[in-house]
Image: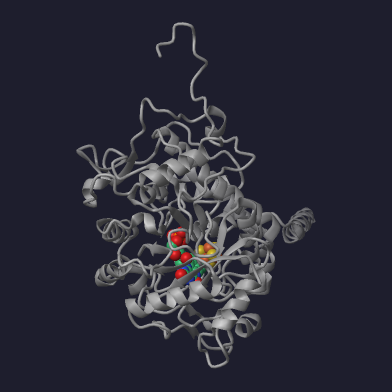
Amino acid sequence: MRARHLIGTVAAGLAGLATHDVLQRKHTLLHNYPVVGHLRFLLERVGPELRQYIVTSNDEERPFSRDQRSWIYASSKRENNYVGFGTDNDIEHLEGYVIVKHRTFADVAPATGVAHGNHDEGIVLPSAKVLGGPRGRRSAFRPKSVVNISAMSFGSLSGPAIEAINKGAKLAGAMHNTGEGGLSSHHRQGGDLVLQIGTAYFGCRDEHGRFDLEKLKDVVASAPVKAIEIKLSQGAKPGLGGMLPAAKISEEIASIRGIPMGQDCASPARHAEFQDVDSMLDWVELVADATGLPVGIKSAVGEQGFWDELVSHMAKGDRGVDFVTIDGGEGGTGAAPLIFSDSVALPFRLGFARVYATFARAGLTDQLTFIGSGKLGLPDNALVAFALGADMVNVAREAMMSIGCIQAQKCHTDHCPTGVATQNDWLSRGLDPTLKSVRLANYLDTLRRDLLKVSEACGVLHPALIDADDIEVLLGVRQATPLRKIYRYQPRWGRIGDELGEEITRIMRPVAPQGGSAPESATSQD
Ligand SMILES: Cc1cc2nc3c(=O)[nH]c(=O)nc-3n(C[C@H](O)[C@H](O)[C@H](O)COP(=O)(O)O)c2cc1C
Ligand code: SF4
């Protein structure tokens, strides 16, 4: 009798907990997996202690380690993202560990309040370059944020996830790249957009699947599209077109893309509108002229000939891209064959450095904006990108994590447990776009804050002023080599030109928090 009573009480308790979990909006995982979802939170909490005895260390998991994910989760919730007791990274033995060199004396110093997390009004960190400015595009502009959201289409991500990202981009003053699936209703939440054009021309093609310039102009006019990115390739699957598995093609997606349901949607590997660098630049000018917008390319880095040719054409000055987005081979994807994800295209640092050096040798680096992606949503990686010459960074999976992704790596199956990368209604309904948009904005803001604070620690007011001499890479405790030496950069490469430097310093000085020291005494030595 007593046992039956106990079972009844437990069952009632579990039913109550399940009802609470389904109805609450804060945690998607609990909504989608009532009761059992608590296990994940429990493991997250006691994980550090458990891992002392079993399983793995904080830095072992991939693609993002537990430490990296915890930093993103804490930042997105504005929880304490500090560490206690010192680093648990094996600095003494690791190869490739990155060290930023702070300056002892400098004109600027981190102000105590902001450095310690007080950034309620948002961190202002605009691009040091005007996008489309050098080529005189009608709608050239200075991006408000050096950190923006990388291409991820509606299809690979759920409608609520796209809405959360677009709203979050608006809150944080960042730009949201549509990905190659076209501009859907979910993208229209008020956030600025970069429209990506892939090889299938989704969203700007006619009924035969051909690119349609008039349609492109209509789409651009219908939403806050600030720039256009022509996708040549992405790091996780260069040489292959986009791929949306049949399991993720809902009626809505089929109608937006103009594709049948029930079969994989594979975009062609190459563009139909141009065949080589020469015709690509003609097409870039055509699109820029028709829309007035800055137009750039996104590419992973493989053979060098393409970049040599691009630079030699751009050196003539009559045609050119407004930006290049270099995606590292370590970049993410919704779905790709293993060999492409693992082994095709250079990792970000190597690929970016080669492309930047090609432009630098021709003296063209101030003529366009360099954007980087490939795990650059972490402060140390982003700083290396800026030191190598990036002007902005794009973040994809880090943004997904800020809105709830737990790195379950099931994005290609339609079974994403957190509702981020699925078209399953039950799973995606658990993701509250309004709540998660704030998380994304918090994360973007924290990353900008860290970039700003480390720049100030290096004695400059903007990460674009950090160069390849400011960062060294360790070979355990035996050797530290400046980035400049590793990537064979010439002096001052990786840094914007003096004129741009003075301009961004002027812009940043009024917002930069000064006062990194105590008030001076009467005996202070000036
Ligand atoms: C779910 C998902 C979907 C993506 N879709 C696209 C896409 O439509 N077009 C594109 O150029 N890149 C796409 N990417 C690649 C990202 O834009 C980005 O370049 C890459 O993931 C590297 O950034 P990260 O390391 O911050 O994730 C996608 C990545 C993910 C994870
Ligand atoms: S939780 Fe897993 S399946 Fe969902 S987006 Fe993240 S990695 Fe992909």
In the rendered image, which quarter contains the N terminus? bottom right
- Residue 239 vs 402, above or below: the answer is below
- Residue 48 vs 241, above or below: the answer is above
- Residue drawn at (33%, 78%) of the image: 278
In the image as oriented, which residue stretches furthest toward the bottom?
Answer: 208
- Residue 225 vs 73, above or below: the answer is below
In the rendered image, which quarter contains the C terminus? top left
- Position of residue 125 measured from the top left corner of the image (x, y, whole percent): 52, 45
Q: In terms of image quadrants, where is residue 474?
A: top left
Q: Is residue 441 left or right of residue 66?
A: right
- Residue 409 is at least partly visible in this image: no
Q: In terms of image quadrants, where is residue 283?
A: bottom left
- Position of residue 345 measured from the top left corner of the image (x, y, whole percent): 31, 68
- Residue 58 vs 150, above or below: the answer is above
- Position of residue 442 measured from the top left corner of the image (x, y, whole percent): 60, 48
State the residue in front, 129 or 516: 129
State the residue in front, 423 or 449: 449
